[in-house]
Image (cartoon, rainbow, N blue to C red):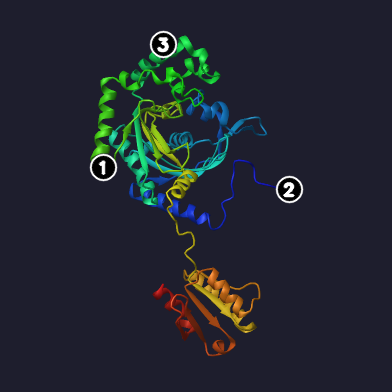
């Protein structure tokens, strides 16, 4: 039997994994300056967490989740997104009791959705996401969007567009819901089966339908912005003011509803305008989810967050031809001549590594020429040459791979020399 990787997954191999590490370093650095702390939740959760938290009417819950029964017939699901687990953990671990609020969290890890694989979209994919839970201040909305933009800018992307909308508060959404039902009800039979189910479950989801996106009723559907009450209008205006104050441009799209049921007030997406990126331009999306903590049995704690696909970020970098230095090389490669020198090099290699110096030796019994080739392939900054004569004199020859200059130094001084000159 031939073993191959499951469809919709990928192996991230050496050479490519360094690009991922580079992005993760950017993410962690920006989260540190914004005081977001990492959390790690289980790969699988009880299925009800997602059906209640994400929403029964969403494509994620209806079509895309990997759900299975354990040995006691409990329904479990591989996590399809990160917000519901983060909020569950916030409630379960009583993070709301911390004196400093909002609680700022971030996560990086695999998510799972059964959907058609395509460029930059997999069935196992990796998301970076943040959640700020415990504040209804529109300033935190602006901070969350600014943080997402900072990640993309720091990574090197230039062709970006931030699109925002307001879904309003509960009262505004109810008024808009009734207007949508009245708008679609008479001709709902012209829409796909999913939209027909959503008419009464959550008519807002109809606006996000991919199959019927060209239907004339979608183009003439009532705008949520026309149903915002004064409080919701004031909130949305404040979010826009803060974004403008910090120099982040944006567009308003009244049809932006996002794919999850828990959003209210601010919703946003960040898109790539790069040529050749593909038909699906969304890089990240998020929004405010006041009421989700209460849905999970916790106290009232308004929240906002976003998630971005690492795969799509890397694809956008490729579309803009942004190069990431994947291999920085090693500090030192030890070339040995003779058995005694090879034996000594094992302990010398260990000492170098213990001192924080990246180093390597030959494990294939190569000739001297072959060892030099290995040093070159590994982009070694220094090549340390150790033979039996040098070993007897407790010296070692050190070659600067860039300049070609070679000198002889005491073995005891090798570590200090490399650290001082690297």
Residue position for label 2: 2
Q: Could you say which is closer to the camera, residue 236 or residue 37?
A: 236
Instruction: Kindly identify the residue that appears in the image at 53 percent across and 90 percent down.
Output: 393
- Residue 379: x and y in percent read 50, 69
Q: Earlier in the sequence, mark 2 or mark 3?
A: 2
Residues at circles 2 and 3 in contact by the CB criterion of under 8 Å: no
- Residue 189: x and y in percent read 52, 13
Instruction: Kindly identify the residue that appears in the image at 42 percent across and 49 percent down.
Output: 320
Q: Whole-Å distance between the Cαs marked 2 and 3?
A: 56 Å
Residue 391, quarter of picture: bottom right
Q: Residues within 10 Å of mark 2 (few under 14, many from 20)?
A: few
- Helix, strand, or loop for circle 3? helix
Q: Whole-Å distance between the Cαs marked 2 and 1?
A: 54 Å
Q: Residue furthest right?
A: 1
Residue 182's disc is 3
Describe residue 207's horizontal placement relative to residue 250 as left or right. Answer: right
- Above or below: residue 155 compared with residue 222: below
- Helix, strand, or loop for circle 1? loop
- Residue 198: x and y in percent read 49, 18
Instruction: Kindly identify the residue that appears in the image at 43 percent across and 27 percent down.
Output: 262
Q: Does residue 18 appear anywhere in the picture?
A: yes
- Residue 251: x and y in percent read 32, 33
Q: Could you say which is closer to the camera, residue 202 or residue 180?
A: 180
Q: Residues within 10 Å of mark 1 (few under 14, many from 20)?
A: few
Q: Earlier in the sequence, mark 2 or mark 1?
A: 2
Q: Could you say which is closer to the camera, residue 413 or residue 242?
A: 242
Residue 310's disc is none
Residue 421, quarter of picture: bottom left
Residue 247's disc is 1
């Amino acid at each position: 039997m031939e073993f191959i990787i499951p469809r919709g997954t990928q192996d991230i191999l050496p050479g490519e994994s360094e690009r991922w590490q580079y992005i993760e370093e950017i993410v962690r650095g920006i989260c540190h300056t914004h005081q977001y702390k990492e959390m790690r939740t289980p790969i699988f959760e009880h299925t009800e967490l997602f059906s209640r938290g994400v929403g029964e009417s969403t494509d994620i819950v209806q079509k895309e989740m990997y759900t299975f029964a354990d040995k006691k017939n409990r329904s479990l699901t591989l996590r399809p997104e990160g917000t519901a687990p983060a909020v569950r953990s916030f409630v379960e671990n009583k993070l709301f009791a911390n004196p400093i609020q909002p609680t700022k969290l971030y996560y990086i890890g695999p998510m799972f959705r059964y959907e058609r694989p395509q460029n930059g979209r997999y069935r196992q994919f990796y998301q970076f996401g943040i959640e700020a839970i415990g504040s209804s201040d529109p300033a935190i909305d602006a901070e969350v969007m600014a943080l997402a933009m900072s990640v993309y800018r720091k990574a090197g992307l230039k062709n970006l567009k931030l699109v925002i909308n307001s879904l309003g508060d509960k009262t505004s959404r109810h008024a808009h819901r009734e207007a949508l039902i009245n708008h679609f009800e008479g001709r709902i039979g012209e829409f796909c089966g999913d939209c027909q189910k959503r008419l009464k479950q959550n008519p807002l989801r109809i606006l996000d339908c991919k199959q019927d996106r060209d239907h004339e009723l979608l183009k003439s559907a009532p705008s949520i912005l026309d149903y915002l009450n004064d409080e919701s209008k004031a909130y949305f205006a404040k979010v826009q003011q803060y974004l403008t104050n910090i120099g982040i441009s944006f567009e308003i799209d009244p049809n932006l509803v996002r794919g999850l049921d828990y959003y209210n007030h601010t919703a946003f997406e960040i898109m790539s305008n790069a040529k050749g990126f593909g038909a699906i331009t969304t890089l990240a999306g998020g929004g405010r989810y006041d009421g989700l903590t209460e849905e999970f049995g916790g106290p009232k704690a308004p929240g906002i967050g976003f998630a971005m696909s690492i795969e799509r970020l890397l694809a956008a970098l490729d579309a803009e031809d942004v190069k990431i230095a994947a291999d920085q090389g090693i500090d030192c490669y030890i070339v040995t001549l003779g058995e005694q020198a090879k034996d000594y090099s094992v302990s010398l290699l260990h000492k170098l590594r213990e001192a924080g110096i990246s180093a390597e030796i030959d494990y294939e019994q190569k000739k001297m020429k072959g060892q030099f080739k290995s040093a070159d392939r590994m982009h070694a900054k220094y090549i340390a040459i150790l033979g039996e004569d040098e070993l007897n004199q407790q010296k070692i020859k050190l070659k600067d791979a860039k300049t070609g200059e070679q000198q002889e130094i005491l073995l005891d001084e090798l570590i200090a020399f490399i650290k001082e000159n690297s």
